[in-house]
Image (cartoon, rainbow, N blue to C red):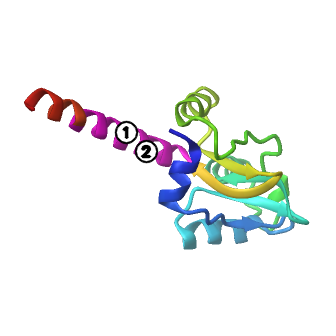
Amino acid sequence: MRVADIIRKKGSDVVTLPPSATIAELVETLADKNIGSVVIMEDDEVVGIVSERDVVRRLRTSQDVSEPVSAIMTRQLVWCGPHDDVRELATTMTERRIRHVPVVVDGRLAAIVSIGDVVKHRLEELEAERDQLAGYVHG
């Protein structure tokens, strides 16, 4: 199965903010949209990603939520494409402890995939395999 299969089911909406947005604006966005990360864009280019974990780490040392998200964003991103294998992506996400991966097509942000999306997709695959085997065994 490919990343495109996940995107077809979940959609390609991605919440973004500029690097100048404040941590307070980020927290509000995360809460309002009920999401775990926001992609940081500048001039139609992905420049980073910020997750709930990044916010928690920052708040542990500084309560200043007026700082820009650029101060806490991850700049070196792991990307994937729609034709990438879901199992390989799951391995990468697990090994590198990454929960959100931007999907890029022709150098442009197309979607985002979470570890939850990957796990859900894999469970659906396993359930389909089980049903096929049960049908084969029971005739």
Q: Position of residue 99 (x, y in %)?
A: 58, 43
What predominant SS class does the magenta segment belong to? helix
Instruction: Say which residue appears at 56% left-offset and 73% top-offset.
Output: 32
Amino acid on which the number 2 mark rests in the picture: His
Amino acid on which the number 1 mark rests in the picture: Glu
| Residue 10 falls left or right of residue 111 | left
How packed mark 1 is, by other alpha carbons closer than 10 Å (few <14, some 14-19, many 20 or more), is few
SS for dot 2: helix
Q: Nearer the viewer, residue 39 or 29?
A: 39
| Residue 92 falls left or right of residue 135 | right
Q: Position of residue 87 (x, y in %)?
A: 52, 31
Mark 1 and mark 2 residues within 8 Å of each other at the beta carbon: yes
Q: Residue furthest right?
A: 43
Query: Residue 20 occupies which quadrant of the picture?
Result: bottom right
Q: Residue furthest front?
A: 139
Instruction: Say which residue appears at 82% left-offset and 62% top-offset.
Output: 41
116 inside magenta stretch: yes
From the viewer's perspective, is residue 116 above or below residue 138? below
Instruction: Say which residue appears at 58% left-offset and 29% top-offset.
Output: 88
Residue receiving disc 2: 121
| Residue 5 falls left or right of residue 18 | left
Q: Quadrant of the C terminus?
A: top left
SS for dot 1: helix
Q: Position of residue 26 (x, y in %)?
A: 70, 66
Instruction: Say which residue appears at 77% left-offset and 42% top-offset.
Output: 77
From the viewer's perspective, is residue 112 above or below residue 132? below
Residue receiving disc 1: 125
Q: Nearer the viewer, residue 123 or 15?
A: 123
Mark 1 and mark 2: Cα distance apart in space: 6 Å
Magenta range is 114-131
Query: Residue 97 occupies which quadrant of the picture?
Result: top right
Label placed on residue 65: none
